[in-house]
Each structure stands twice: as C-alpha cells, then as structure tokens.
Image (cartoon, grey):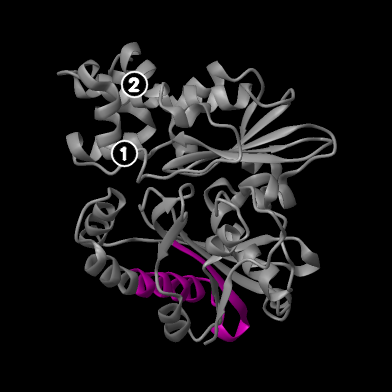
Amino acid sequence: MGSGDLNSKDLYIGLISGTSADGIDAALVSFEHSQPRLLAHHLHPIPPEVRERLVSLFTPSDLQVDLMGELDIAMGRLFAEAAQTLLEHSNTPAAGIRAIGSHGQTIRHRPVGKHPFTLQIGDPNVISQQTGIDVIADFRRRDMACGGQGAPLAPLFHQSVLSSAQETRVVLNLGGIANITLLPREGLPLAMDTGPASGLMDSWCQLHKGEAYDCDGDWAAQGKVIDALVSKWLSDPYFSLAAPKSTGKEYFHLPWAKKMAGAAFGDSDPADVQASFLELTAKSIANAIQDLPMKIDRVLVCGGGAHNKRLMNRLQDLIQCPLEPSEKAGIAGDWVEAMCFAWLAKCYVDNNKLETGPFTGAKEAALLGGMFKA
C-alpha cells in the first residue's frame, strides 16, 4: 500500500459474515478517483463454539432471545477483531479509515407477511467502541421501511462495478444462498435470491462428515442424483415466484428438505443426498437465469461456492453462455460482498441515496444504514 492510499482519506473497511457463517470477511477498500480498489483483505475465524450456537439460531425454535442477545455482543467483538486484524496486517492506522461498513450476521429474514422484518446481529456499538472508528450498519431495515425486501443489496455494487456497455451480464453470487443480478447492456437491471447455494450442502456435510463444507464437491461426486428428490424440492412455490424476491437459511434448511421430500427422502445414501442438493442448487440457478427476459452473454461468478468445482462444472453444463469468475472483470470474487459494504458505507458518508427498487422492490430511493459514532 502506498502513502498516497493512506493520505487519500477515502479508505473504508467492509465487514460481513454470510449465510454460511464460516468466517468474517474484512476488506480494506480505497475509493480514490471514486473507483473501489481492494487494498487488503482478511478472513477472520469464528470460534467453533460460537459458530455452533450461531447456526442453531438459523432454524426457528423457541427460547432464542437470550442466545441472540449474547451472540449479538459476541459477534460484535469478533467483527471488531476482524477490522483490527485487517488494519494490523496492512499496516494501516485506524485514524486513516473514514468508516466501517458492517453488514452483520443475518439470523432471520422474513421479507413477506403482515410485518416483514430482517434481523442482523454483531452490535455496531461494540464495533465502533472497540475500533475507535465510525461504523455504518443496519442497511437492510431502511430498505424494508421503504417497501423493499431488504435484500439482496450486493446487486447495487454489482451494477456499479461490473456492468458493461458491450454485453448483457449476470453476476452470480454463491454463498449459503444464491443470488443473481441481471446487468443489461441496455435497459433496467433486476436481481433476486434464486434459492440455496452452499447452505444445504454445508449443513448435510457437517451432519454426516463432521466437515464444514464439501471441498470441490468431491463427496457429491461420489453420489448419484436422486431425481425424485430434486423434483420434490423444486416444486416449492418459492422457485416460481417472480423477482424481486429474497430468502435465507431460515427457509432453506434441512428440515425443509426432509419435509418437502417426504417419503422420497427415505433411507437414501448420504452421498446421493449430497449429490441431489448440488443438483438442486445448479438447476434452481440455471432455471432462474434461463427465465430472465433477455439473452445473457456472460455469467460472472463470485462467492465461496465458486470454489466448488463440481458445482461450477454442473452450472456450465446447464447455462448456455460463458461462465467465468468475477476476477475476469477485475473484482476479486471472494471479497465482492465485503467490498460492497465498504462501498455502502461510503454512499452513506457521501449522503448518496440509493435506488434499490429493481432489486428489492423498494418504493423510493433511500440513504441506507445508520451511523454509530466512535
């Protein structure tokens, strides 16, 4: 990092723990000349005992309020540690950071109903107090107050940095949940959560293998797809909903999979179920892309699921256009979402109201987030 970066006064940190809850992504981003540039990054581990309790919050059950409150503080401390470690590793003083944009950890997302809501933990008061840096957080709820679903928000950043005047692109983000952003060469953008990405596969792998994820999809490759299972799962009404739409792991979880499958689940071999979860992910994404209202020239992939070789190969089989990592367009795929929240923090500081209607259904542009002063 050069001295010009430190003196630009336009350095931001973006923090997010995604639906996979496999760690906190921290990105140091420069916006010199208004263009985001990733200067440094850090994946901060979530201790296994914290992750176990955290994951238990993703599936609705009784008596979760005390646990939520405790983890709100615990995750706030971990987010602060992630930012501090990033600063240490990049030799950047806290005084050089204009603000931290923290998405937090989503534990519940209910975008429809009489009183729709979304809930992220990782107390920004703790982050600002521990780091001495202003924090911009709570981005989703303002969007909901404007009539939107509060998610997905990353398409705002996709539109800003990955659009092309020469071709129509789709940005595919593979986290615990998959989302796509349509970026037309001409016309209005569109975005949606398509359904599960790595979430079901990760949960099944943890249950049967004691491992957080299926490296390269190797375990899925050992199984055989059970077509009856995939068909049952794809019959869920969510997949036929029109955009904008959003979802989370409180919807697509293992109890959902077993309930939807019914007798088809039976005593299936665990490797076959894993192969079927991968097929569900690939088909639900491919179906959503094929249903888009225009021809797609290229799909740019980001997120942790992009490292699943088996999934990427299956997606390429199903999608009739080039499928490439977002690095080909100049944005590091593993850090897109953390960079997004650094960018959203800058938008807040610059008093830039954002038009999220094409992505979330919000009725008006809004200044997303709230300030938590150091």
Residue 85 figure quarter: bottom left
Specify the amino acid type for callout 2.
Ser
Q: Position of residue 366 (x, y in %)?
A: 69, 64
- Provide the residue designation for mark 2: 276
Vertical arrangement, residue 148 with respect to residue 95, above or below: above
Q: Could you tell me which residue is drawn at 70 percent across and 68 percent down?
A: 347
Q: Could you tell me which residue is drawn at 52 percent across and 49 percent down?
A: 334
Specify the amino acid type for callout 1.
His
Q: Is residue 134 magenta?
A: no
Q: Classify 10 Å Cα crowding around label 2: few (below 14), some (14-19), many (20 and above).
A: many
Q: Position of residue 222 (x, y in %)?
A: 28, 19
Q: Nearer the viewer, residue 26 or 191?
A: 191
- Provide the residue designation for mark 1: 253
255 on left or right of 9: left
Q: Could you tell me which residue is drawn at 19 percent across and 41 percent down?
A: 210
322 on left or right of 315: right
22 on left or right of 169: left
